[in-house]
Every structure is written in structure tokens, then in C-alpha cells.
Image (cartoon, rainbow, N blue to C red):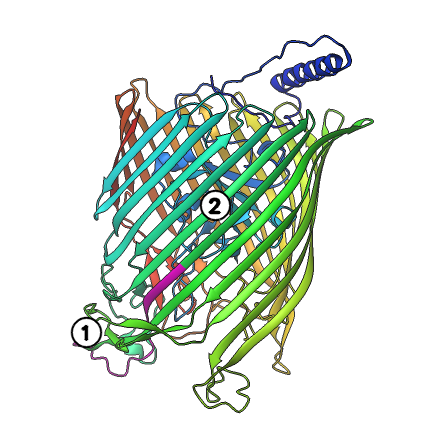
């Protein structure tokens, strides 16, 4: 029987929780009496079993991390937890794939003209959340493609979450919870192979050494092609050992480590020539040009994307008494990314010939990055249950000290041809990158203090309050080649063209104050109503500690932090024996301090304002013991409240913000043990930014359907088949800001997996 460590604060108005609370009170009373008497009472050990189920658990009640004391069903905020069982049924191996389970979140943007986002460039409710991705509550620095082989669950928190994490994106945050060594023993090996040369293997093994100590090891290796994308390849491997001491005791110590390597051939995408809404740069007679072959690859054998991630974590918990727990997390993480990516732009049709597509050329350029991100942090706190008269408090408070650094080595490509044939690209050229000396360095030191207070008032009311103050010192400096003709260096100080001069040298100190206030009313033992208001800030350079010298860029160091506030009203219901969570929310998010150009004096000011209003509906969990579901829908009404329009159609809509988005996934176990399932996703139209000619102004809406089935060969072995994009739908998964390049959605593919437990 597995030992289950329960949270201190249990759900209101359920017979099970009342019984547990009563029994806990009797035990506490017994302990007090034992301490006051000379006779020691026998120790009582309580264990609880997970609810029996014939399918995986989709609904998860708690966020990871002891400082979050309340279950999701009683937290006045939109939170979606994607469990490892959902990821397993879908064979979702990356964070980007996991995000398909929450509506309106995805990798919609393909980057700027000269670069492509090769990592998790995620957008949520109209704003990037790249800098708001966390691992076990610690910021996960660097922009790389995150694998889920060592992930217990993915937690998507929508709306400002600054009171929990400090500087965060206006629309929310994402936390990946790591698999920990725990009680019990299991070893699970998964071998999978699919169409388009996809191959992957994982191992998850947990071994309990004794009653209080356990080891766990997760391994992953993958060498896969990208469906219908010539030469593109995903090659990675990872190892994640963990050990836990003190299981089931008053003191617990967890140590874990992650090493991940990626040696990928990146994908620069396809030219948008021939897509709906495309027009030639200058000659309208070419407007009916055909689309390019989706297999075309416009890079070369020289392109690479190398990533190395190392993260070491020590977590300690100590139950000082029955109502006070101390916890401390220390972490060191390092992410290094080095890549060379071929980029392109259709900006000239003067040499095209209607009768000879082999003459249609476009500009090609190289983009390089050599970047190292380092984070070291210590997070210390307490969880404290206190009663003050008729009120019951669950306090969570602590301090955090964090050191973050980014190092960028200046690099450039050499030997790259400056053009490529649109319809018949050659990728046999070889070129390389070299260092230029135009390096950059950024560092941010943060001291933070936070306080959460959950106040229970009687049988029906609960108040949730959170406050966090971050005092940070940020330093950034960079070098650039002096070139007065194009303004790369604003002041050459008498240096010669080509000399390295200081481009930016900035130090700033700021204090960020984030807070939230919510109230929840428990209608009955099944459902509640809540309201919540939250405020957070994102200072310049928050996404990657890199600031910009461009006055139009919000990452310019002279600007104030962007401020986000969200008001939300909603309801949550636990049904089907507490195994199904239904949620509905209305919300409104305002973002201030956006950078805008004044049409009169031509200068830039932080006068812009944006708003996203919406509704979100979701259902997660078990309808019956054999039937699981995870589904969600969101409707977003986004607009620029103050400032110029961002999109090409002149409306006040925000870019990459679908008006409607829907996701669903369900599985059912038949009486003979076969599990069948599937789902559908809808993504509304995405409007892009930029004023470029010769490019479509949007990405059309689309539907995609997936299926799965698994068969138990033996009680320990099952075979699983996943089919993706069943109708082989052609769609745009992401598009770059100027609309010259896009990433096509994956075609119909199949994945066959063998899962063996021993």
C-alpha cells in the first residue's frame, strides 16, 4: 500500500475531508495529551490509497511544491494541470506538444526575419510566456525545446502569477514538475517507432531501498526525422537520477539531477509563396504563384542546433510540529545553446520568369546564436496552520535569493550563398560560423519575499491573498561593430568602422510588487463560486535578461516594467466521486506601459495599453472509472486600447491571438481491456504583425483530429498505436512576424509504442 503524504489543508464540505479532519484532530489531541502525561501512547500510522481506476488519472488536485497549499478546485484562478497519463496516452514528448491540451496556447510565432525560434516560443492569451516557464517552481532559463521524459505533470496557470514567481508574463506561467523518487517499486520501458523515421526509447525505474529511502532513474534517447521535412532531424538524449531520504518521516530530503543533450538539424520553415492572401513583392502578375513542396528544406547540411542542459536540485522539508513545516530548495542550472540556422526572405521578383520556376530566387541569410544561461537560487519558506478565533489561516511565506546570468558570444556565418531557388532549393552547400567578438553579458540578482494567506471563514467562505516583493539589480553590457552608416553603434566615440565599441552598458535597480486577492464561496460539497484580482510586472529584458538599444523595443533598459492586471470570476465543480473537475471563468486582462511612437514628435513613449477579455471552459478527469476526458474551450476578444494597430488589416486585434480555440481528448477502456481514444483541436485565425509586402496577413483557422488505441498483450505489456492528423490536414502551425516564412503543421503520421512494466 503506497504511503500518501496529504496536504495540510483539505477541501471543504466533503464527508471524506471532514472525517480526515476529525481523525487528525483526535490524533493531535492524543499527541498533546501524550506530551503532558508520563505514559507514551502508541504511534498510529495512517495510510491512504489512491482511488481505484482502470485508466490513467487525468485530473490532478494539487500543484507541485509545498508552498501551494490549496487544491486546484478551490483556487480562485484558471489552472490546468496536464498529467503524465495524458502525455502518455497522447505520446506527447515535448512541452509544445503538451500545450495542445490547453486551449489557445501554442508556438504560433516563428520569430523575426533573420531568425527562427528553435525552442519553446509559446504564446498564451496574446502574449509570449517564454520567460515564464518554470521547473519545480524555479525559472527554467534558456530558449530550448523541453522534453517531457522526466515530467510528472505540466501546470498551466493563466493570468498574472507574479505573487508566486515574481516577474512573469502578463498572461500567465507554465511549471513542469519533475518526477521524484517515491515509495514502491516499478520499472517501465517504452520503445516507440513511427512513420518518417521516428524512433524513441525511455526508461522510468523506481527502487525503494528501505522504508524511508528510494531511488529513481529516468532515461531517454531519440533520433527522429520530422514528418515530410527533408533533412530536419530531432536527436536528443537525457538522464535524470533522483534520490529521496526520509519518506514518511518528519524530515525529507530530495536530490535530483537532469542532463539533456540535443543535436538537432533545425527547421527554418517554408516560404509563404502561394498561400491564401499572398501577393508578389512588386509584380501582381505573379500573385497566382503555386505553393512550394512542403518537403523542401532551405537550409544545408551545415545547419545545427546544439543544446546542453544541466540542472541539479536539492529540496528539504522538515515538519517542525503538526501545523508548521519548513522547506528549502537549492538549485543550480546551466543551459547552453549553439546554433546556425539558414533563413530566407521573398523580397524581390524582378528576375522571375513565368515560364521557368527555376529562376525564382529569394534572399538567403544565416542566423547564429551561442548563448549560455545560468541560474543559481535558494528558496526558503514555511507552511503554517494558525487559528485566530473564528478564522483558520493557512500561511505560506518565505524568502528567495536568485542569481541569473546570460552570456552571448558574437558569431556570424561565413561562406553562405546569398540566394536560393524557391521551388528547387539546394542544400548541398557547406558553410560555417565564426566568432566576431561582439559579445554581450547580462546578470540579474534578485532578493524576494512572499506571503500567501488562505483564510477559512465558517463553512462556506474562503479568502485567498498573496503578496510578493522582488528587489532586483540588473546589469547588461554588449559590444558592437562601429558602423556609422547603418547605426549599429549609436556613438562610435571616434573609433574606426569595424572596431568593437560599447553598444549598451546599463545597470538598473527596481522593486516589483505583485499581489492577488480572491474570495471563494462554497455552494455545497460539489461546487463553488470565486472572484480574483491579480497584478504582476515584467521588466525590460525579463524574457531572457537581454535588453535592446532600439527605442521601439519594450526591452530597452530605460523603460518601466510592463504592468498586467487580471480580474476573473468563475466557478469550479467536483463531480463523479470527486474524479471530474468542471470549471468556467470570465476574465479581463489589461497590460499597460506598452511602447508607442508619437505621430507628432516621432519619439517613443510608454503610453500603449492592451486588453484581452475572454471566457474559458474546461472538463478534466474521469466521467466513469473507465472513461477519461480532458477538454477545454476559450473565446478571446483582444484589442489595442491605446496605441497603433499591430495587425495588417488595420483592426485593433492583437497578433497571434485566436478568437476561438478548442481542444479535447478522451479515452475509454473496454471490457476486454482495449483502450480506445482520440481528440480534436481547433485553432482560430491568427493575425500577424509587420508591414511587409508580398506576404499573407494571417494564418487560417484549422481543425485537427487524432486517434489512439492500446492493447494489453500481457498484464505487464501493452502495445499502443497513435495516429495524428487523421484527415491529413494542411495548416499553418506558426508564421514569422513579417510573413515570409511559415512552419507547416505535421501531416498524417503514426506512432507504435511497446510499453513493458517489470
Q: Is residue 188 magenta?
A: no
| Disc sitting over residue 312 in the figure | 2
| Neighbour tally class for label 1: few under 14, some 14-19, many 20 plus, Cα within 10 Å | some
Residue 100 visible within the image: no
Residue under numbered circle 1: 357
Instruction: Please determine whether, in this image, residue 9 is positioned above or below residue 340.
Output: above
**Residue placed most toward the observer, 326 or 646:** 326
Q: Position of residue 717 (x, y in %)?
A: 27, 25
Mark 1 / mark 2, whichever is N-terminal: 2
Please give the range of residues in magenta: 337-358
Q: Residue furthest top?
A: 39
- Residue placed at 66% from the left, 40% from the top? 381
Q: Position of residue 685 (x, y in %)?
A: 43, 56
Q: Secondary structure at mark 2?
A: strand
| Neighbour tally class for label 2: few under 14, some 14-19, many 20 plus, Cα within 10 Å | some
Gap in angstroms between the C-alphas marked 1 and 2 = 54 Å
Amino acid at each position: 500500500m503506497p504511503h500518501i503524504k496529504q496536504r495540510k489543508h483539505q477541501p471543504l464540505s466533503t464527508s471524506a475531508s471532514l472525517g480526515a479532519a476529525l481523525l487528525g484532530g483526535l490524533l493531535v489531541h492524543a499527541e498533546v495529551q501524550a506530551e503532558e502525561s508520563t505514559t507514551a501512547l502508541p504511534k498510529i500510522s495512517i495510510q491512504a490509497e489512491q482511488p481505484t481506476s482502470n485508466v490513467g488519472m487525468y485530473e490532478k488536485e494539487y500543484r507541485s511544491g509545498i508552498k501551494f497549499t490549496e487544491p486546484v478546485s478551490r483556487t480562485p484562478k484558471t489552472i490546468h494541470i496536464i498529467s503524465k497519463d495524458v502525455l502518455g496516452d497522447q505520446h506527447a514528448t515535448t512541452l509544445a506538444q503538451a500545450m495542445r491540451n490547453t486551449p489557445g496556447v501554442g508556438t504560433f510565432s516563428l520569430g523575426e526575419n533573420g531568425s527562427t525560434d528553435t525552442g519553446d516560443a509559446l504564446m498564451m492569451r496574446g502574449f509570449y510566456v517564454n520567460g515564464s516557464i518554470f521547473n519545480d517552481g524555479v525559472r527554467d532559463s534558456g530558449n530550448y525545446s523541453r522534453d517531457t521524459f522526466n515530467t510528472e505533470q505540466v501546470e498551466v496557470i493563466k493570468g498574472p502569477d507574479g505573487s508566486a514567481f515574481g516577474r512573469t508574463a502578463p498572461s500567465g506561467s507554465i511549471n513542469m514538475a519533475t518526477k521524484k523518487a517515491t515509495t514502491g517499486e516499478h520499472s517501465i520501458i517504452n520503445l516507440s517507432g513511427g512513420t518518417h523515421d521516428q524512433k524513441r526509447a525511455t526508461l522510468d525505474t523506481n527502487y525503494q531501498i528501505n522504508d524511508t529511502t528510494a531511488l529513481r532513474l529516468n532515461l531517454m534517447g531519440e533520433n527522429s526525422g520530422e514528418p515530410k521535412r527533408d533533412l530536419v532531424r530531432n536527436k536528443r538524449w537525457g538522464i535524470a537520477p533522483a534520490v529521496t531520504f526520509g519518506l514518511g518521516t518528519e524530515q525529507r530530503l530530495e536530490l535530483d539531477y537532469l542532463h539533456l543533450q540535443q543535436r538537432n538539424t533545425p527547421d527554418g520553415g517554408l516560404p509563404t509563396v502561394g498561400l491564401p492572401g499572398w501577393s508578389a513583392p512588386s509584380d501582381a502578375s505573379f500573385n497566382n504563384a503555386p505553393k512550394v513542396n512542403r518537403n523542401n528544406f532551405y537550409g544545408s547540411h551545415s545547419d545545427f542546433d546544439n543544446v546542453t542542459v544541466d540542472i541539479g536540485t536539492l529540496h528539504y522539508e522538515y515538519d517542525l510540529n503538526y501545523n508548521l513545516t519548513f522547506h528549502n530548495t537549492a538549485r543550480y542550472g546551466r543551459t547552453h545553446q549553439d546554433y546556425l540556422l539558414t533563413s530566407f526572405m521573398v523580397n524581390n521578383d524582378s528576375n522571375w520568369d513565368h515560364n521557368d520556376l527555376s529562376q525564382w530566387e529569394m534572399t538567403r541569410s544565416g542566423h547564429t546564436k551561442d548563448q549560455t544561461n545560468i541560474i543559481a537560487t535558494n528558496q526558503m519558506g514555511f507552511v503554517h496552520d494558525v487559528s485566530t478565533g473564528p478564522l483558520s489561516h493557512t500561511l505560506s511565506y518565505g524568502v528567495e535569493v536568485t542569481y541569473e546570468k546570460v552570456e552571448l558570444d558574437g558569431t556570424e556565418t561565413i561562406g553562405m550563398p546569398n540566394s536560393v531557388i524557391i521551388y528547387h532549393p539546394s542544400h548541398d552547400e557547406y558553410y560555417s560560423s565564426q566568432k566576431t567578438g561582439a559579445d554581450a553579458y547580462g546578470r540579474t540578482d534578485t532578493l524576494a519575499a512572499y506571503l500567501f494567506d488562505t483564510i477559512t471563514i465558517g463553512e462556506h467562505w474562503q479568502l485567498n491573498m498573496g503578496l510578493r516583493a522582488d528587489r532586483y539589480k540588473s546589469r547588461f553590457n554588449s559590444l558592437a561593430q562601429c558602423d556609422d552608416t547603418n547605426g549599429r553603434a549609436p556613438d562610435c566615440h571616434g573609433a574606426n568602422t569595424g572596431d568593437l565599441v560599447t553598444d549598451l552598458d546599463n545597470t538598473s535597480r527596481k522593486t516589483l510588487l505583485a499581489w492577488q486577492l480572491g474570495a471563494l464561496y462554497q455552494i455545497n460539497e460539489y461546487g463553488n463560486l470565486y472572484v480574483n484580482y491579480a497584478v504582476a510586472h515584467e521588466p525590460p529584458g525579463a524574457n531572457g535578461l537581454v535588453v535592446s538599444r532600439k527605442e521601439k523595443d519594450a526591452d530597452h533598459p530605460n523603460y518601466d516594467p510592463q504592468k498586467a492586471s487580471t480580474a476573473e470570476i468563475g466557478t469550479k465543480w467536483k463531480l463523479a466521486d470527486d474524479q471530474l473537475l468542471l470549471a468556467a471563468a470570465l476574465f479581463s486582462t489589461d497590460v499597460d506601459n506598452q511602447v508607442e511612437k508619437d505621430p507628432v514628435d516621432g519619439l517613443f513613449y510608454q503610453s500603449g495599453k492592451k486588453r484581452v477579455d475572454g471566457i474559458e471552459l474546461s472538463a478534466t478527469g474521469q466521467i466513469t472509472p473507465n472513461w477519461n476526458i480532458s477538454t477545454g474551450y476559450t473565446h478571446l476578444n483582444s484589442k489595442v486600447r491605446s496605441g497603433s494597430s499591430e495587425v495588417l488589416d488595420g483592426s485593433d486585434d492583437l497578433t497571434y491571438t485566436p478568437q476561438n480555440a478548442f481542444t479535447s481528448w478522451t479515452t475509454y477502456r473496454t471490457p476486454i481491456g482495449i483502450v480506445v481514444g482520440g481528440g480534436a483541436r481547433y485553432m482560430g485565425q491568427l493575425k500577424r504583425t509587420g508591414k511587409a509586402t508580398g506576404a499573407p496577413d494571417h494564418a487560417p483557422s484549422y481543425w485537427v483530429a487524432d486517434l489512439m488505441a492500446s492493447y494489453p498483450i500481457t498484464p505487464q505489456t501493452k502495445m499502443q498505436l497513435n495516429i495524428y492528423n487523421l484527415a491529413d490536414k494542411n495548416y499553418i502551425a506558426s508564421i514569422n512576424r513579417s510573413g515570409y516564412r511559415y512552419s507547416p503543421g505535421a501531416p498524417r503520421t503514426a506512432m507504435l509504442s511497446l510499453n513493458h512494466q517489470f
